[in-house]
Amino acid sequence: MIELKNVSKKFGNHTAVNDVSFKIEKGEVVGFLGQNGAGKTTIMKLITGILAPNEGEIIINDEKISNKSKKLIGYMPENIPLYDTLTVKEFITFMAELKEIKRAERKIEVDKIISDLNLKSVENILIKNISRGFKQRVSLAGALIGNPEIILLDEPTVGLDPKQIIEIRNLIKSLKGKHTVLLSSHILSEVNQICEKVIIINNGKIVAVDTPSNLENKMSNNIITIIVEDPQNKMNDACKKIKEIIDIKLLNSDKKEQKYELSVKDDTDVRKELFKELPKYDITINELSKTESTLEDVFMSFIKEEGEA
């Protein structure tokens, strides 16, 4: 559906996009994750044809990008650039005209998108007089009108309050399977909740492409945090009986409890062994938890590695 092959884009002496390659299949919802200035918006503008690459190819539906392929794309730019002097319905109708929706079908399409995005209550209000949350919906309506196969959303929840963020996220989730979606964001939780695949970009380069869960699993340090009562100070001896434990670190201690961090080999789960072995040494387990890596850990790790390269 969307494929970039060794794409680069320069602005003067600055390389905004550096030899980028990735592929997005039909119907996928993909998160484009990176810090501000990483190159996300530039790549979206390259896919839409607003910008042309200095090097490389952009393929849409197995064809090089063209006026024909551009009609397959609905684009929601960052910072919601709308016409404030138009009403909501006038703007969406204008977008329908730009997308060359037939006059006989235009009113039906406009009314449907207004209904789908819950804009009926503001359809006759000037855009300058509606809330930012409604403006985000109007911008999304402009992208969705005409039912394009590909939807590009650039930072769609920036500046919204928590309630508005949830509403926009739910709208985006509803697109899954019906459209191919590329969602640009620097908000990790947003990508994790919405997207089935993540592309991480830093300084114009792709540093990772995978599912959120796979990325998190790859970063797993397999660390167990355990709080025990160990009156005879036998914790080290007990842990030596479990060969998968490669390191034990005392985090804090008082007269009653001790808190340890256990490093374990690979993906081994030793929790059952701990419950079996420690009581033999009169050690009581008060709390035990396995530390899980998050998408934030993954993101920061890739950014750090790229910065050190």
Image: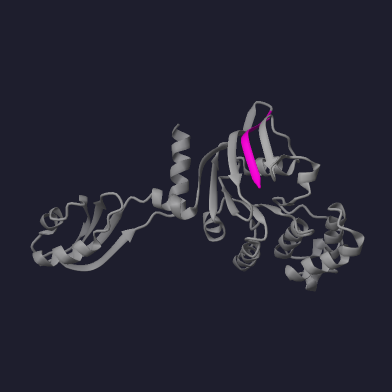
| Picture coordinates of residue 281, whole percent (x, y) | 9, 64
Q: In which quarter of the image is the C terminus?
A: top left
Question: Does 166 sit left or right of 75 as displayed?
Answer: left
166 or 178, nearer to the observer:
178
Q: Is residue 144 above or below residue 51?
A: below
Q: Farthest residue to the front: give it.
A: 62
| Picture coordinates of residue 191, whole percent (x, y) | 55, 55
Q: Farthest residue to the bottom: give it.
A: 121
Instruction: Please give the range of residues in magenta.
Output: 1-11
Q: Is residue 257 visible to us here?
A: no
User: Quadrant of residue 57 in the image?
Assistant: top right
Q: Farthest residue to the right: give it.
A: 103
Question: At x 26% / y 49%, what residue is drawn?
Answer: 265
Reply yes or no: does residue 4 show up in magenta: yes
Question: At x 88% / y 55%, what residue is drawn?
Answer: 97
Question: At x 64% / y 67%, what residue is drawn?
Answer: 167
